Image: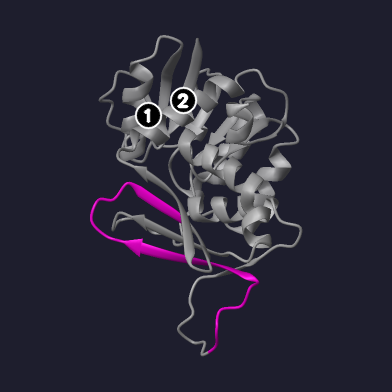
């Protein structure tokens, strides 16, 4: 049994993780952390992780970058691995995560979907063939109107996967409105669309001469992210210190 402390438990994703965990016999939400301390799922809820006195094997965080320092401190002090699912971290915060991973196991992913992480592997393995053959690369991501950060962490995850597969990194370009020139060969264009209740759509477009190849991933429910997070938590239980990714979970 993997006992989990769920940060952000009463948010949309937290409730989805709770429902997914309830369907499995080998994981359990032992406690929750949320500014809204409603105890509606049968486990204790604390307003701050600093107040949590429940023992657990792993922490899953689906909350906000604002609580990162407290989560890292709690994880290090109690030797509990962390699954960080929150996006929008600053470069300084990413540095703190990397430092903390020297003491405890941390898995950070901008997208917990198994499908997205399989796509990232495919892009890394094929990027050189496309770009080397003269294809341009563009990424278009679509999310619900309430999402605050843009471009999405997932779009950047996919762009990073492409650059991992190349001998020379391409630049990320988010806006061409101030330019009056043809598209250079040295960039990946990343466009963000916000509207409605779209859980998450990502298209990676390789456009060549007279042909276009598009890799698409569409999330029809937040459950795909919750399932990946729970799977990652079970994977991380008992792991040695280090920085892990969903590619480690997938093997």
> Where does label 2 land, which residue?
230
Percent position of residue 12, x then y: 30, 39
Q: Badge 2, how many Cα within 10 Å: few under 14, some, many 20+? A: many
Q: Is residue 197 above or below residue 139?
A: above
Can see residue 240?
A: yes
Q: Is residue 130 above or below residue 248?
A: below
Instruction: Tell me the residue at 70%/44% (across/down).
Output: 98
Percent position of residue 54, x then y: 48, 19
Which residue range is magenta in the image?
181-204
Q: Earlier in the sequence, mark 1 or mark 2?
A: 1
Q: In which quadrant of the rendered image does the C terminus lie?
A: top right
User: Which picture quadrant has residue 78?
Assistant: top right
Q: Is residue 21 above or below residue 243?
A: above
Task: Pick whichever, 233 or 31, lies toward us.
Answer: 233
Percent position of residue 32, x then y: 40, 28
Q: Are marks 1 and 2 in contact (CB under 8 Å)?
A: yes
Q: Could you give the CA–CA distance between mark 1 and mark 2, rounded to whole angstroms?
A: 7 Å
Instruction: Tell me the residue at 65%/17% (across/down).
Output: 238
Q: Badge 1, how many Cα within 10 Å: few under 14, some, many 20+? A: many
């Amino acid at each position: 049994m993997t006992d989990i402390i769920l940060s952000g438990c009463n948010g949309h994703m937290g409730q989805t993780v709770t429902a997914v965990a309830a369907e499995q016999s080998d994981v359990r939400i032992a406690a929750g952390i949320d500014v809204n301390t409603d105890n509606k799922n049968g486990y204790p809820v604390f307003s701050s992780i600093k107040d949590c006195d429940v023992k657990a094997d792993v922490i899953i965080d689906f909350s906000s970058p604002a609580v990162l320092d407290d989560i890292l401190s709690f994880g290090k002090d109690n030797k509990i691995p962390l699954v960080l699912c929150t996006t929008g971290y600053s470069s300084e915060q990413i540095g703190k995560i990397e430092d903390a991973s020297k003491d405890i196991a941390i898995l950070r992913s901008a997208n917990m979907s198994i499908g997205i992480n399989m796509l990232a592997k495919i892009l890394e393995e094929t990027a050189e063939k496309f770009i080397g053959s003269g294809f341009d690369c563009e990424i278009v991501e679509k999310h619900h109107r309430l999402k605050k950060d843009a471009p999405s962490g997932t779009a950047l995850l996919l762009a990073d996967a492409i650059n991992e597969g190349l001998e020379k990194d391409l630049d990320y370009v988010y806006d061409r409105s101030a330019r009056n020139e043809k598209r250079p060969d040295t960039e990946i264009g990343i466009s963000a669309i916000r509207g409605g209740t779209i859980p998450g759509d990502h298209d990676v477009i390789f456009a060549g001469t007279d042909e276009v190849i598009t890799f698409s991933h569409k999330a029809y429910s937040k459950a795909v992210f919750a399932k990946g997070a729970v799977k990652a938590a079970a994977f991380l239980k008992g792991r040695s210190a280090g920085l892990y990714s969903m590619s480690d979970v997938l093997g």
